[in-house]
Amino acid sequence: MTRSRLLQLLALSTSLLVPACMADPDDEAGAADDGTAVHLMPMTSPDKVADAAPAGAHLTFFGGPTLTHVSVHPVFWNANTQFQTNINAFYKGVTNSVLYDMLSQYSGIGRGSGVNGFVDNRTATSVSDAALHTELNRLFTAGSLPLPNASNYYPIHFPAGVNITAPDGSRSCVQFCAYHGTYKRNNVNVNYGVIPDQGGGCAGGCGRNAQRVNNMDSVASHELVEATTDPAVGLATTFAAPLAWYDRVNGEIGDICNGQQGTTVGGDGVTYVIQLEFSNAANNCVAR
């Protein structure tokens, strides 16, 4: 990574947007530095979660793409990943809910869809972001996942005991709850998320609901909506395209409301716990 590119990344936000420039030597797989970045959801103690958006919060459009009708293709790291039935239903239901109707104010985003996740067979318990690029590319080549396009989002869900290292060295359930990022494959953006198991170290720092599955849904919704409204954040180096909807001070749509929880009724009629998301129209964190 060149010094000029690093300075550009620092100008965005060192705490939330980090360059993909190193891999853990103990990872199952690795990849060369490709200059991409990820956007972290930091851990926040429940007693530090605000009850409203910070004063002056406002999302600005910087010209980048959005996922107008997101199509969610979950990946389960292996068969031990918990709550798979819930996760499959969650993505189908929430993308077809009033929460997504609220997003119409952002470049005309509409409702999306989801499919049942692909169960992978990975056994690595220490994984870098670069290794996840490698694994997604393997699944694309094998035909296990549909090829990336302008709509697809690939959230990777992990079982307990798997530690994910972000490109800056941050660790899952130590510094971050989850993240989403972007990299290019054959000149097409791959929009992906990383959702660690929300038990263990993540408990108490990634949601204040009493039920672990509800905190997992909340964290997943944070990354889902951010990936919908700002999918190419992992390729952005300045406050300009490919950045899409972003607040220079507070970050992405989910960051503004980090940890604030509510509920939405999915298209399947089931009520899901979600993280509230920021609405420019309401000037606050909302569920619809």
Image (cartoon, helix red, strand yellow):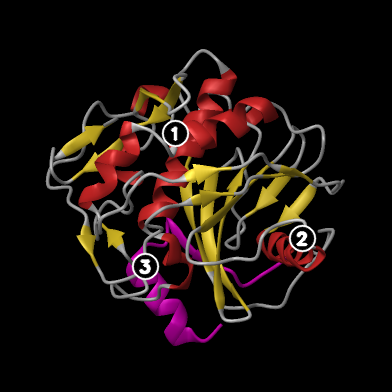
Q: Secondary structure at mark 1?
A: helix
Magenta residues (range): 1-24
User: Which numbered dot is residue 65?
Assistant: 3
Which disc is residue 86 wearing?
none
Q: Residue 195 appears in which quarter of the rendering? A: top right
Query: Which residue shows up at 72% across the image and 28% down it?
Result: 82
Q: Which residue is mark 2?
A: 139
Which of pointers 1 and 3 lies earlier in the amino acid sequence?
3
Q: Which mark is residue 94?
A: 1
The image quadrant of residue 117 is: top right
N-terminal-most mark, 2 or 1: 1
> Which of the two discs, 2 and 3, labels the residue nearer the N terminus?
3
- 119 or 10, which lies in front? 119
Give above or below for 118 relative to 209: below
Amino acid of disc 1: Val
Q: Which amino acid, mark 2?
A: Leu
Is 109 situated above or below 49? below
At numbered mark 2, what does the secondary structure look like: helix, strand or loop? helix
Q: Residue at x 47, y 17 (%)?
A: 209
Mark-to-mark CA distance, 2 and 3: 24 Å
Q: Are discs 2 and 1 less than 8 Å apart at CB? A: no
Residue occupying the far top of the picture: 210
Q: Is residue 118 magenta?
A: no
